[in-house]
Amino acid sequence: MARAPLIRPTDAPPRAHETASRTAQAPTAPAGDAVASQPSTDLPRHVAIIMDGNRRWARARGASEIDGHAAGVEAIRELLRHAVRRGIPVLTLYAFSRENWARTDEEVVGLFGLLEQAIRSETDELRAQGVQVRLLGRLDELPPATRASIESALSATAGGSRMRLNIAFNYAGRTELVDAVRAIVRSKADPEAIDEATIASALYTAGLPDPDLVIRTGGEHRLSNFLIWQSAYAELITRDTLWPDFGPEDLDGALAEYASRNRRFGR
């Protein structure tokens, strides 16, 4: 007996994922810019990093937790420069989760201060490098001084076309989905017309390719509520290295491992 033809759902993954990734636009490096020898086809379009281990790094040295976070900010500077040189179009850094509000007032206030200081000191260099800075998270919940610093950096780097740097600050993946659902409801969308593309267009990362590679430092093996929708097909790489010790050579190692993997997307 002949078998009936298989009828596939029109929005079955990874179809929607692939379509969004192909059509999304990300900053591109200007012609003639020198990058490392690795072919661009082997580079991820979007690298997301969970920067874990600042506090453990500090404790191991008898330093304060804020000292550990300050060392983590220094690590960001060098890694960002290297990512620009490598030609990575989109880089997302998990800097402060909404769960981090549960930490002590001293640590939270210190983190906000470090962010403000880093933005003020680095904005000119970011603009010179062609880096466009965007925030992923609820900006309205931040203290006024922190919010003003972020908004200033967003405005100053808006013309950057070489790299998109997303700072996930006051961010949580589930909160992002809540905000997306609220936006879709407000738009009065037809429930039957809502698909994966509809949801993706309402996320903080709308218009960007999903992460191809998620790196987590500090030896943990979980996403911790980070880009939980967008990372559905991401390659995950974890490293025992604590974030302040994670340098350009560590990024290169992760990129080489990524290039060696065979991404089948369920095929």
Image (spheres, rainbow, N blue to C red):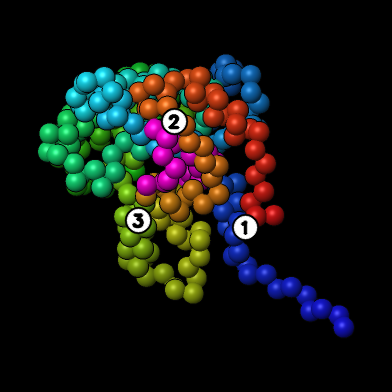
Q: Position of residue 43 (x, y in %)?
A: 59, 31
Tell which circle, 1 or 2, labels the residue nearer the N-terminal end: 1
Reading the image, the residue beneath label 2 is: 240
Which element carries disc 3, helix, strand or loop? helix
Circle 2: residue type = Asp
Q: Position of residue 188 (x, y in %)?
A: 37, 70
Quadrant of the image for the C terminus? bottom right
Q: Nearer the viewer, residue 220 or 45?
A: 220
Which element carries disc 1, helix, strand or loop? helix
Magenta highlight on residue 36: no
Extreme-right residue of the structure: 1
- On the rendered structure, is 75 left or right of 48? left
Reading the image, the residue beneath label 1 is: 15
Q: For the point 74% across and 73% down, which residue is it?
A: 6
Q: Nearer the viewer, mark 3 or mark 1?
A: 3
Circle 3: residue type = Arg
Magenta highlight on residue 221: yes
Name the magenta segment's main secondary structure.
Answer: loop
Reading the image, the residue beneath label 3 is: 174
Q: Is residue 29 visible?
A: no
Range of magenta residues: 207-224
Label 3 neighbour load within 10 Å: few <14, some 14-19, many 20+ = some
Q: CA distance from mark 1 to mark 2?
A: 34 Å
Tell which circle, 3 or 2, labels the residue nearer the N-terminal end: 3
